[in-house]
Image (tube, rainbow, N blue to C red):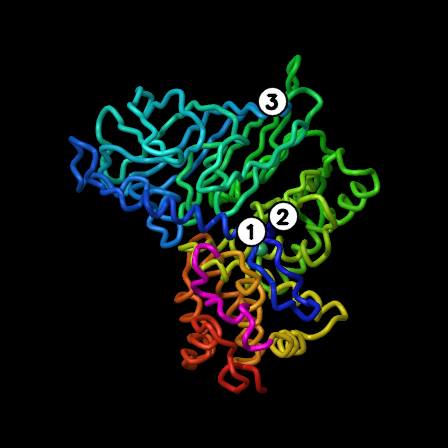
Amino acid sequence: MPELCRHPAPFPRRPSRRRASPRRATRAAVLAVVLGLLATTPAVSAPGVDPAAAPRPGNGGDSYFPGHGNQGYDVQRYRVRIHYRTARKRLEGRAAVVARAEQRLTRFHLDLRLRPLSVTVNGRRAAFSKPSGRELRVVPRRPIAAGERFRVVVRYGGFPARLGWGGERPWQASRTEAVAMGQPQIAAWWFPANDHPRDRARMDLTIVVPRGQQAIANGRLVGTRKRSHRTVWRWRAAEPMAPYLAFFAVGRFDVRTSRAAGLHQVVAASRRLPARARKRALRQLSRSAAITRWLESQVGEYPFGATGGVATALDTGFALENQTRPTYGRGAITTSLLVHELAHQWFGNHVTVADWSDIWLNEGLATFMEVRWTETHGGMSGAQWLDRAWRWRDPDLPFWRVRVADPGPRRIFHSAVYTRGAMTLQALRNRIGEDAFWRLLRRWAAERGGGSATTADFTALAEEVAGTDLDAFFDAWLHSSTRPPRSRTTGLVP
Ligand SMILES: [Zn+2]
C-alpha cells in the first residue's frame, strides 16, 4: 500500500538503490494529467457568460492540480450533514456553504465527485450541471456582487467507494467501517468544497449512522442524539481548516473523550482491531495531548482547541494529519508517527501550502520534528542524524534527483520530500545556529499560521532571521537535483 503522510523512517537502514516512489504518487501523476487537460478548457466556453465576471471555472490555480479548488470566492463555513449507510457504502448529504465573493460571479464551481440533486443560492433554486466528474457548476438566478456573502445549499448522494478520478479511488471503506481520509483530495467524495488548502473554513459536521455505530470527526463533540434506528453525531471545528483535512470515521469504535494536559482530547479505536492491538492503539493515541504540549514547547502555541486521534481497522497504508484528530491505518502507531502527525497541526494545517508544489514545507518540517523528538529523548542528535543520512546515500541514488521544492505532481510523496526536506532543516540549523533556527520555526508558525505560504516565503524569513544571504544554501538543498556537497555553505561542515 502507498504511504502518504507517513514518512520513511528518519533513522533508516542503509537505503536500497531500488527504492521506488510510492504507488500513490504514480496515481497522482495520472490525476495531474487528467486535471491538467481539464484546466486548459477555455474560460469563455460557456455561452452567454461575461468572461470578465467569471473566474476560470474549475481552475483553482494550483500548478500541480489545477482542477482542485476554484477561484472567485472564499468559503467561510461548511455546515455538512451526512447520512452514511456503512453496509451499503451509500452516502447522502446536505451541505450549506457560506462564502464571500471576491469578484462579481455570474456562475461558480464547487468540487463535488458525487451526484448533485438540488442546489439553492441564497434560498433560491439555482441551475447546476456537472461539466466533469469532479466539478459542480452553479448558475445563480442573479449574479453575486463582488464582496457579497452568499449561501449555497447542495443536496447530493451516491456511492463514494465506486468513484475514482484520474485513476485514484480515495474512499476508504469496508462494509463495517469507513474513514474519509486522503491527500491531496478526499473532500469532493463527501461534500461540495472549494478543495484547495488555500481556502480554509470552519466546519460543522453532523453524521447520521446506524444505531450502535459511532461517528468521529474534527474538533469537539457537540452532542449525540439517538433515534429509533440511528444515532446522530454532531461535531464542530472552531478553527478554519483546509477541506482535505476535514474527516469522519464511522463504524464500531471505542471512543474516549477526556481533558488531557489541558486539552479536549478525543481518541477512538476500531472494535474490529484485535483486542490487544486496540488496547495498544488507545494507549498510544492517549499520548496525543502530552505530545502536543511537547511540540508547543518547541515551536510555539498550539493553534487548535482539541486534539486526539483515530485508529481504523482499515488497511489504509498511511496515516493522515486531519485537523485536531489524525487518523491512523491498522498497524503499529509508533511514537514517531504520533509526533509526525501532530507536528503537522502547525506545519501543514495551521500554515497550509499555497501550492501543492510546496509540500516539503509540510513533510520536511513534520519529519524534522521526529528527529528533534529523538534527540531530546535519549537518541542521536540532529547533527549526527544529518551526517549519517547524507553519508549513507550514495550521490547517484534517485533520492538526490528529486528537487525538494518542486518534486513534480507524481512525486509529492516521494521519500526525498520527507527526508531531504528534514535534512534541509537540520543543515539550516547547523548553518544559522540554534537560536536563529528555533526563532525561525516559531515565527513561521506564528506569523504564517492561519494562512498559506510558499517556499519563497520560508527562505525569505530564514534570511531575515539569520541576517544573511542563504541563496546558495537553499539552491543546494531545495532546488538542485544532486547531492549537496560537504561545505560550510551547505551546513554539512561545522
Ligand atoms: Zn506527513
Identity of the amino acid at label 2?
Met
| In front of the other: 454 or 220 | 454
| In front of the other: 74 or 485 | 485
Up-down relation of residue 163 to residue 22 (above or below): above
Circle 2 residue = 1
Q: Which mark is residue 473?
A: none
**Who's the residue at 59% across and 46% down the image?**
324
Identify the mark nearer the N-term, 1 or 2. 2
Identify the mark nearer the N-term, 1 or 3. 1
Element on which disc 2 rests: loop
Identify the mark nearer the N-term, 2 or 3. 2
Residue positioned most to the top:
228
Q: Residues within 10 Å of mark 3 (few under 14, many from 20)?
A: few
Magenta segment: 394-410
Circle 3 residue = 88
Identity of the amino acid at label 3?
Arg
Q: Is residue 445 left or right of residue 96?
A: right
- Residues at circles 1 and 2 in contact by the CB criterion of under 8 Å: yes
Residue positioned most to the front:
18
Expressed as whole percent of the image width and height from the top left, the position of residue 491 reads 54, 81
Q: Is residue 107 left or right of residue 135?
A: left
Identity of the amino acid at label 1?
Arg
Q: Residues within 10 Å of mark 1 (few under 14, many from 20)?
A: some
Circle 1 residue = 23
Up-down relation of residue 405 to residue 231 (above or below): below
Decide whether residue 409 is among the magenta residues.
yes
Quadrant placement of the C terminus: bottom right
